[in-house]
Image (cartoon, rainbow, N blue to C red):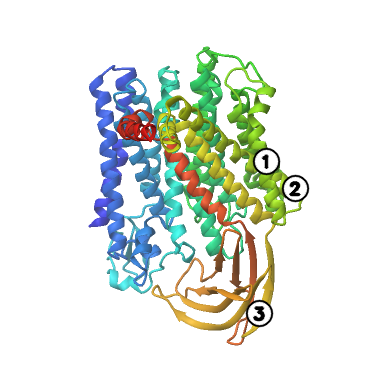
Amino acid sequence: MLAEIGLIAALFAFIVAIYAIIVSVYGERFAHSEAMVISGRNAVVLNFILMTVSVLCLQVAIMSQEYQLTYVWSVSSPDMPDFFRFTALWGSQAGSILFWSWLMSVFAAGATVFNWKSQRRLMPYAIAYMMAAVAFFIGLTLFFENPFERWWILPSDDVMAAVFPPSGAIAPTAAMLAQSANGLNPLLRHFGMAIHPPMLYLGFVGFVIPFAFGMAALASGDLSTNWIKVSRRWTLVAWLFLSLGLILGGRWAYDVLGWGGYWGWDPVENAAFLPWLIGTAYLHSVMIQEKRGMLKTWNMFLVIGTFSAVIFATFATRSGLVDSVHSFARSGIGFPMFLFWFTLTIIGVVLILWRRGRGELKDEHPFRSVFSREALFVLNNFVFVALFVVIFWGSFGAPILSELVMNTNITLGADYFMQVTPPLFLLMYILMGVAPVSAWGISTLARMGRAMLIPLGLTVLSLGLFVVSGVTSAGALLGYGVVVLAGWVAVFETVRGVLARRKAHNENPFTALIALLTRNPRRYGGYLVHIGITVIGIGVIGSTLFQQETQRTLSVGESLELSGYVMRYDGLLLNQISEDGRVMDIAELTLIRDGQEIAHLRPRRDFFPNATDMNSMTIAGSYSTVENDFYVLLVNWETISANSATFKVYINPLINLIWWGSFILIAGTMLAGYPRETLPARVREKLQLTTAQGAAS
């Protein structure tokens, strides 16, 4: 019964989405009927309700182990823990597309309800674009990847999957299918991977809102900054979740894939990174339009490019375009997704060129200084676009072109990316350091130089600490210097604002900081994001340039030494059985430093006898400090026994700064997106009380 309810709800949601498109556009543009447009708005909300019912039906079916559904059978098993049973909703192609459709309906309903009154002119067209995206993905669920298919036993005793029962077929019971159920792909049975896909989906789906409002501005003729203002927080939310998705994906790779790293320049990793690059460029660029009325055409291209990159990334991951540990299996959705991506992109470009030709996207001010903030932001945009181009070429352009033209598959590996991207990332950090001290409109090199004196001094001191810690490589010191400078500029600008406010209002430093954050959260939240990215950058440089590794076969009681650590092999536990049925071989190790035992590590190899996607994986043991990670693998290509085993050991310097920096980035993004107009009212009384107490003391 759950399958039927879920399927019918999805079907009606598809019909309602198409209805919303038609009545919104027709009612606004041709019939001039407020009632029709309101009906379109209500249809968006109804679509959300129906999609919620559909997703809940599938989720309940998974949790209640209804193995008659092919999707439930393929992603769960009787011995699977409830947490992973819950996350199995997005564990494979069909369920993840339904989940994606639901998330998109959530964003569409939220954007419609919250902005209906304030953006009445834009809303009918925004609804049309949002519902077009929702309808497309629901269509994929209904006609290509239906998670409500059932198993059927034919009169010939053959078994087939179908939504509706074939003639003469009977449905097997859940008990009949339970023992043969596949269970979740072992690679996905990790907390990081359990929440990585939803974060990534929220980031991808969230970018439909700025895209829809940008297209609504082009369609309606309201080419003011309204579409930017109304979609800014939605963009920040999408950017935040996409950032989290990328970081969690890196953490999952570090913990589960067993190769000592967190980013391998895999095509699917890169596919998710591409919309982040264009989205980041867009977030910076729209500030110029808001402040100076410039880059109107460019911003339209960026918002289209961001959503286009999202759809392409989804297409690349799910169509079988690339083979990857991260990608889904090949399916029939490749051509429809390509057609959808191509159509939306062409429509957007045509609308931009049409409005541009009518003179409606003219800039209000010219560039007046190459050192102005807007000029540096444009250069920043070029860096992000250049990164997009070189990563796209290495991941998709060269392989696809070589196959089409030369009938051979050329793959550009990590060496290519490590050659072309570091200079661009270095330039990105330079601009992060320079742009905040420049002025809007007109700025001079001398003014910027004076503003940079203190951050430069702090950077030199920081480099001294790196040298004392043993860093002597000129390239590493250059990288650290550029990255640290960007962070010190963000800190200095914040401190300077606190001191200025303290002097003007006689406030204590804490009160001045809170007041500063509440009155301009966008600016100081942005500085906090820059600090987070600085911390991440330090971790990336340290773990990339100074990683050490070794491999040894040890007998019980033997040790190996690396970078001041001594690792002793104490024994091996063979054929240990976990709750979910995996069989584990676990090595027991003791880690010693400076003659003291500091940790007991248990790297292991997991085997999944009933899994079809894969049947083993290697889980590292690690000991983490601020200085580095001691990371050890029980290698899976060597024979092990009770007396000896082979280990691969890595020392990953500063790698934990990558994860810690992500928390700073989260805090900064949340601050930047907080409604400024609501903050002073909430904290004014407390601020006044604290200020009065400070003055009295």
Q: In the depicted view, which residue is nearer to us: 352 or 73?
A: 352
Instruction: Specify the quadrant of the image occupied by residue 490.
Output: top right
Q: Nearer the viewer, mark 1 or mark 2?
A: 2
Examine the rendered structure and indicate whether residue 536 appears above or below residue 190: above
**Res. 92 in view:** yes
Q: Residue at x 54, y 55 (%)?
A: 250
Q: Which residue is mark 3?
A: 559
Q: Any mark on residue 67, and which? A: none
Mark 2 Cα shell of 10 Å, populated few (<14), some (14-19), many (≥20)? few
Q: Is residue 197 left or right of residue 654?
A: left
Q: Which residue is mark 2?
A: 475
Instruction: Give the Cα separation between the discs numbered 3 and 2.
Output: 34 Å
Instruction: Specify the quadrant of the image occupied by residue 260.
Output: bottom right
Mark 3 Cα shell of 10 Å, populated few (<14), some (14-19), many (≥20)? some
Instruction: Give the Cα separation between the discs numbered 1 and 2.
Output: 11 Å
**Res. 327 in view:** no
Location of the N terminus (image quadrant): bottom left
Instruction: Specify the quadrant of the image occupied by residue 261.
Output: bottom right
Q: Residue at x 59, y 67 (%)?
A: 631
Instruction: Give the Cα separation between the discs numbered 1 and 3.
Output: 40 Å
Examine the rendered structure and indicate whether residue 606 appears above or below residue 349: below
Q: Which residue is mark 1?
A: 426
Q: Give the amino acid type for the residue marked by disc 2 in the picture.
A: Gly
Examine the rendered structure and indicate whether residue 74 appears above or below residue 695: below
Q: Residue furthest front?
A: 697
Element type at marker 1? helix
Q: In the depicted view, which residue is nearer to us: 60 or 342?
A: 60
Element type at marker 2? helix
